[in-house]
Amino acid sequence: MANQAVGHYRWWICGLIFFATTINYLDRQVLSLLSPQLMSAYQWTNIDYGNIVSLFTFVYAISMMVAGRFIDKLGTKKGYILAIIIWSVGAGIHAIAYQMGFALYQFLSFIGLADIDKENGLVNGSAAVAVYSVAGFMIARAVLAFGESGNFPAAIKATAEYHPKKERSLATGIFNSGANVGAILAPLTVPAIALLWGWQWAFIAVMLIGFVWVGFWWVWYEKPEDQKRLGARELAYINSDVDEESDVEKVVHTPWAKLLSFRQTWAFAFGKFMTDGVWWFFLFWLPIYLNAQYGMAATDIAIPIAFIYTLTMVGSIGGGAFPNFFLRYGMDVFNARRTAMFVIALFPLVVLFAQPLGHISYWVPVILIAIGASAHQAWSANIFTTVSDIFPKNAVASVVGIGGFAGGMGGVLLNQLGGVLFDHFEHLGKISVGYSIMFAICATAYILAWIVMRILVPKYKPITEL
C-alpha cells in the first residue's frame, strides 16, 4: 500500500511535534544566550549562574521520572497541552524574575524566615539585586523544567498512536531533529530580540509562540480513531502492524528495585551520568565562555553557537547509522553498537585542544567543541538503543527513566563544578585554567563511561523475563 494512496495526515501531526520540540529547545536556551548581559545587570557570580542552571537540570531530571505516567493518565492531547502551557508560562515569567524574587523574600521576611535590611537594601549581607534575581530566576527555571519534561513522553506517545511500528523510528528522527533546529534558531533570534526590545521580550516571545502552538494542537489533534480528517485507508495503514493484544495491555511496570539489581541497568545509568552533563554544560555555558575568553557580545556569539548545533545534526543522524558499518563486517548488533560507541567516544578528545589552540582564533575552540557536541549526539543515539538491545519491552521505559535521572544528576554536578571553578580562577585572574579543567572533563567523560560500561557488561547478556 503506497503512502500516497493512504494519505499523509499523520505527517502533519509529526510536523506539529517537530515544532513543539523546536520550541522546547528555544525556551531552554534563551537564558544561556542572555547570560553575559544578565550576569552583569544583576551582579551574578559564576556560582549564582551555576545554581540557576543546576536547578533546571535537577527539576527536569526528577520530573522525567514521572512525566510519562502523567501523560498516560491525561491522554496525549490534554497532556501535551498542559506540558507546553506550563513551560510557556515558565519561559514568560523569566521576564519578571526579579519581581518574583523580591516578593518571595518579602513574604519570607514577613513570616520570619528571612532577614531583610530595608535601609541598606541588603538580604543577609548579600546584594539585594543579586539575591532577589537569583531566587526569581530559579523559580522560573523550575517551572520551565517541570513543563519541558513532558515534551518527549508526549511526543513519543503521539508518534506511537499515529504511526505503524515500521515507521516510528523515521517519525521519531524527524521530530527529534527539532531539538537541534531550536538550538540553531535561538542564537540567531534571541540576541536580536533583546537588542531591539529588551531582554525581557526574548522570554515573552517564546512564551507566545508556545501558546500559538497550543491552539494548533487543540484543533488538529485527536486520537486516530476519533480523527475526522484521517481517511479510512490511512487509519488502516497506521494499525497495519498492531498485535491482537495491544501494547498497552502488555505493559507491566517493573519495580525500580528489581531493575537496579541488574548490572546492565547500572551500566546504562553510569553512561548517562558521565555524559549527559557534558551536553548541559555546552548548552548553558558556551555563551559565557565566548564572552569571558574572547569578549564577544550576544550578537557576535550567534553565528558560532548556530554553527555548533548545526554540526550536531550530523552527529545525531550519522551516529544512529554508524553501527551498520560494523554489521556489514559480520558483527552482531550488540558488539556493532559497542564498537561504534568506542569510536564515537574518541572524538570528544579533540576538546582537550580547545584552550591550548584557542589563541589562534576563537573559531578553533568553536570547531573542536562542535565536534565534541556532535559526538555527544551520536553517543546518545546509541546509548539509548542499548537499553532496548538488552531489556524486554515492558522494562525499557523504566530503565530509560533511571538513566535520565542519572544523567540529570550528572548535569547538576557539572554545572555546580563549573560555577565554583570559574569563580575561583576568575578571582586569581586565570579564568582560562578553569575552562581548561572543564574541557578536560568533557573530553574524557565518554571514554571513561565506555570503559566502565564495558566492565559492568563484558558480553551480551539480555534480560529475557521480568
Image: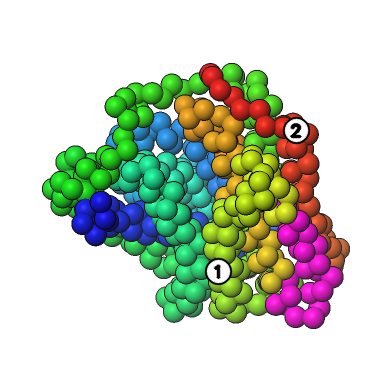
Per the model, the C-alpha gap separating discs 2 and 1 is: 35 Å
Which sits earlier in the primary sequence, circle 2 or circle 1?
Answer: 1
Q: Which residue is the site of mark 2?
A: 458
Residue 310: mark: 1
Q: Nearer the viewer, mark 2 or mark 1?
A: 2
| Percent x, y of residue 120 | 62, 56
Query: In terms of depth relative to the viewer, which is nearer, 46 or 62?
Result: 62
* Residue found at x 38% / y 65%: 205
Amino acid carrying label 2: it is Pro
Name the one closer to the observer, 49 or 153.
153
- Quadrant in the picture for residue 377: bottom right
Residue at 69% from the left image edge and 37% from the top image edge = 270
Residue type at tag 1: Thr
Q: Secondary structure at mark 1?
A: helix
| Residue 349 is covered by the magenta coloring | yes
Can residue 43 be spotted in the picture? no
The image position of residue 439, as x and y in percent, is 77, 59
Q: Tell me, yes or no, whether the two marked residues, 2 and 1, touch with CB atoms within 8 Å.
A: no
x and y percentages locating residue 339 in the rendered image = 71, 47
Give the colouring mode of the picture. rainbow
Residue 301 is left or right of residue 451, and the answer is left
Placement of 35 over or under 220, stated as above or below? below
Judge whether 41 appears above or below 263 on screen.
below
Q: Is residue 329 left or right of residue 256?
A: right
Residue 97 is marked as: none
Asked if one can make out residue 153 in the rendered structure from this viewpoint, the answer is yes
Q: Check disc 2: other Cα within 10 Å, few if <14, some if 14-19, many if 20+.
A: few
**Where are the magenta residues, as a range?**
345-365
Residue displayed at 75% across by 80% down? 361
Residue situated in front as seen by the camera: 458 or 363: 458
Camera-side residue: 27 or 375? 375
